[in-house]
């Protein structure tokens, strides 16, 4: 039951668009894709993540390992409302980047002193992750304090 609840709180991707970066004779081209993720616990905040997608035959079959590079920009897109108290750090989104053990992650951190939500994207592997990352922040109006879980 707890796993079902945790899964329900994770953001779902909405594809915004993509651009081809390299032509492939067989299979789809290599691309950069841009997806939008609405924060499942914070109405009015959307994160845009761009990342490379490997094409070719392996990419077309879902067997390719995408590069561990991503960029993130989160913005207030409407009135901010919290669905409940936020933990100091929480995974907002996770998606596989290879058949086994590699994931793209987006984590929300709360900077209570500045009333700001900080979003970090990175990739990890079972044994060895990548230090490449990207960070963005959304300042929340002081009239709307961020509710924190203890």
Image (tube, helix red, strand yellow):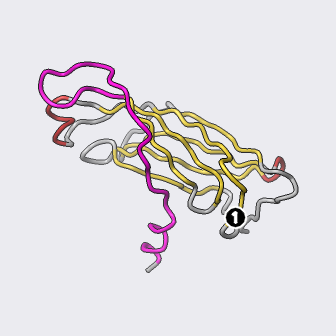
Please state if 48 lies on the left or on the right of 86 as rendered: left
Location of residue 119 by image quarter: top right
> At x 73% / y 68%, what residue is drawn?
150
> At x 83% / y 51%, what residue is drawn?
141
Q: Nearer the viewer, residue 58 or 21?
A: 21
Location of residue 145 by image quarter: bottom right
Q: Is residue 110 above or below residue 57?
A: below
> Which residue is tagged 1?
82
Rendered location of residue 24, percent (x, y)? 18, 22
Rendered location of residue 9, percent (x, y)? 51, 66
Please state if 40 lies on the left or on the right of 127 as rendered: right
Residue 112 part of the magenta segment: no
Label 1 packing within 10 angstroms: few (<14), some (14-19), many (20+): some
Q: Is residue 86 above or below residue 16?
A: below
Tell me the element at label 1: strand
Rendered location of residue 131, percent (x, y)? 50, 32
> At x 43% / y 72%, what residue is drawn?
3
> At x 69% / y 41%, what residue is drawn?
137
Please state if 149 lies on the left or on the right of 92 as rendered: right
Q: Nearer the viewer, residue 109 or 15?
A: 15
Pick out the residue farthest to the right.
143
Quadrant assignment for the N terminus: bottom left
Q: Nearer the viewer, residue 19 or 97?
A: 19
Number of numbered discs: 1
Residue 27 part of the magenta segment: yes
Please state if 149 lies on the left or on the right of 54 as rendered: right
Give the magenta-colored segment's residue range. Answer: 2-31
């Amino acid at each position: 039951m707890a796993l079902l609840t945790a899964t329900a709180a994770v953001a779902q991707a909405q594809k915004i668009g993509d651009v081809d970066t390299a032509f492939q004779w067989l299979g789809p081209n290599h691309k950069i894709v841009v997806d939008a993720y609405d924060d499942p616990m914070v109405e009015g905040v959307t994160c845009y993540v761009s990342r490379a997608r490997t094409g070719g035959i392996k990419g077309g079959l879902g067997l390719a390992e995408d590069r561990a590079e991503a960029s993130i920009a989160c913005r207030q897109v409407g009135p901010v409302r919290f669905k409940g108290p936020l933990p100091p750090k929480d995974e907002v989104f996770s998606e596989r980047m290879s058949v086994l053990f590699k994931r793209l992650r987006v984590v929300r951190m709360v900077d209570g002193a500045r009333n700001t939500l900080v979003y970090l994207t990175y990739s990890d592997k079972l044994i060895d992750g990548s230090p490449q990352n990207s960070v963005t922040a959304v300042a929340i109006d002081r009239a709307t304090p961020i509710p924190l879980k203890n």
